[in-house]
Image (cartoon, grey):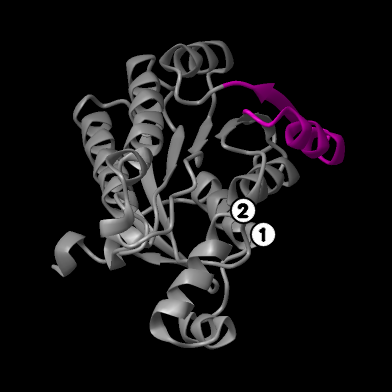
C-alpha cells in the first residue's frame, strides 16, 4: 500500500506515535522514527526492520528543516508533545499551564513551516496530531486544549496555503479521544473519573471503545494512503475516523 514511500513520524517512541510508526512500516513505507528516547527507538527499530531511528529534539527548528530537506518524505506525521500537568486551573503555575504551547504548538509550527517551505512533493500528506480536547475542552490540563485547538487551526491554515500555491500537498488534523491505552492518557482518565465521582471503568465505559496505538496507526495509514474528500480535521475514536465538528460547534 505504501511501498516505495518515505514517512517521517515525529514522536514515534511511545503511545499513539509508536502505533503510527509501526502501521506505516507494516504498510510498506520506510519510516524515519524521530524522538528523544534512544532506548525506545532502538526497541522500535529492532521489531520493525523498515524503521530508522533518529534521536533528536522535535522542538528544534534546525532539526525539522534538516530532516525534511534530507528525507523529502511522502508522509509527515507530527505526533510529539508534552505530557500536560493534571491540575485544576487555579493550581497551575504559568509554566505548567503554558507547557503545551511551548512544546506542542512549537513543534507543529516548526514542522509545518519546513514542509511548506521546501515544499514536499505533490501528493504528500502532512498529518498533525491534535486532540479531542480541542473540541471538548480539558479543564484539568491547563492550556492543553487551547494548544491542541491551535494545532488544528494551523493544519487548516497550512492546507489552505498549500492549495492556494498549487503545491498538491494535503495537511490534515487528527483529534483522538481521551484514552487509557497510553502513558499520556492514563493520568487524565484517572483524574477525570475522580472529578466526576465515578470509577475509571465507569468513566471509560461512557467514552465508548478505547483509542489504542493500533487504531491510531490504522487511521494514519488510511489518511496517508487513501483518496480524500474535503475534510481537513478528523475525530479519532475507538471505532475509527469521523469528520470533526466545526470549531465552536458550528
Q: Work out whether residue 186 or residue 104 is closer to the camera in this orientation and state it.
A: 186
Callout 1: SS = helix
Q: Which mark is residue 44?
A: none
**Residue 92 visible, this orientation:** yes
Callout 2: SS = helix
Q: Work out whether residue 199 or residue 103 is closer to the camera in this orientation and state it.
A: 199
Label 2 neighbour load within 10 Å: few <14, some 14-19, many 20+: many
The residue at the point 32 percent across, 25 percent down is: 167
Asked if residue 192 is positioned above or below residue 22 in the image, the reply reads: below
The quarter of the rendered structure image containing the C terminus is bottom left
Q: Which mark is residue 214?
A: 1
The residue at the point 80 percent across, 33 percent down is: 45
Asked if residue 212 is positioned above or below residue 198 in the image, the reply reads: above
Asked if residue 43 is positioned above or below residue 209 in the image, the reply reads: above
Contact between marks 1 and 2 (CB within 8 A): the answer is yes
* Residue range of the region highlighted in magenta in the rendering: 36-56
The picture quadrant where one finds residue 210 is bottom right
Image side of residue 66 versus residue 26, left or right = left
State the residue position of label 2.
217
**Residue 237 visible, this orientation:** no
The residue at the point 32 percent across, 56 percent down is: 91
Was residue 101 drawn as part of the magenta stretch in this picture? no
The picture quadrant where one finds residue 117 is top left
Amino acid at each position: 500500500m505504501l511501498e516505495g514511500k518515505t514517512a517521517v513520524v515525529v514522536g514515534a517512541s511511545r503511545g499513539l506515535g509508536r502505533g503510527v510508526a509501526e502501521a506505516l512500516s507494516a504498510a510498506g513505507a520506510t519510516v524515519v522514527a524521530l524522538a528523544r528516547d534512544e532506548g525506545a527507538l532502538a526497541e522500535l527499530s529492532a521489531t520493525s526492520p523498515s524503521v530508522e531511528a533518529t534521536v533528536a529534539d522535535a522542538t528544534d527548528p534546525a532539526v525539522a528543516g534538516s530532516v525534511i530537506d534530507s528525507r523529502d518524505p511522502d508522509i509527515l506525521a507530527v505526533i510529539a508533545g508534552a505530557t500536560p500537568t493534571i491540575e485544576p486551573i487555579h493550581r497551575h503555575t504559568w509554566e505548567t499551564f503554558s507547557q503545551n504551547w511551548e512544546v506542542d504548538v512549537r513543534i507543529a509550527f516548526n514542522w509545518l513551516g519546513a514542509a511548506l517551505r521546501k515544499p514536499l512533493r505533490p501528493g504528500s500528506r502532512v498529518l498533525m496530531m491534535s486532540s479531542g480536547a480541542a473540541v471538548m475542552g480539558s479543564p484539568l490540563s491547563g492550556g492543553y486544549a487551547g494548544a491542541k485547538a491551535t494545532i488544528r487551526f494551523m493544519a487548516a491554515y497550512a492546507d489552505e496555503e498549500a492549495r492556494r500555491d498549487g503545491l498538491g500537498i494535503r495537511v490534515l488534523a487528527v483529534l483522538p479521544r481521551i484514552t487509557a491505552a497510553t502513558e499520556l492518557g492514563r493520568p487524565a482518565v484517572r483524574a477525570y473519573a475522580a472529578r466526576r465521582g465515578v470509577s475509571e471503568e465507569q468513566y471509560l465505559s461512557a467514552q465508548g471503545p478505547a483509542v489504542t496505538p493500533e487504531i491510531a496507526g490504522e487511521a494514519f495509514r488510511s489518511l496517508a494512503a487513501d483518496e480524500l474528500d474535503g475534510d481537513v480535521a478528523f475525530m479519532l475514536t475507538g471505532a475509527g475516523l469521523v469528520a470533526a465538528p466545526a470549531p465552536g460547534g458550528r
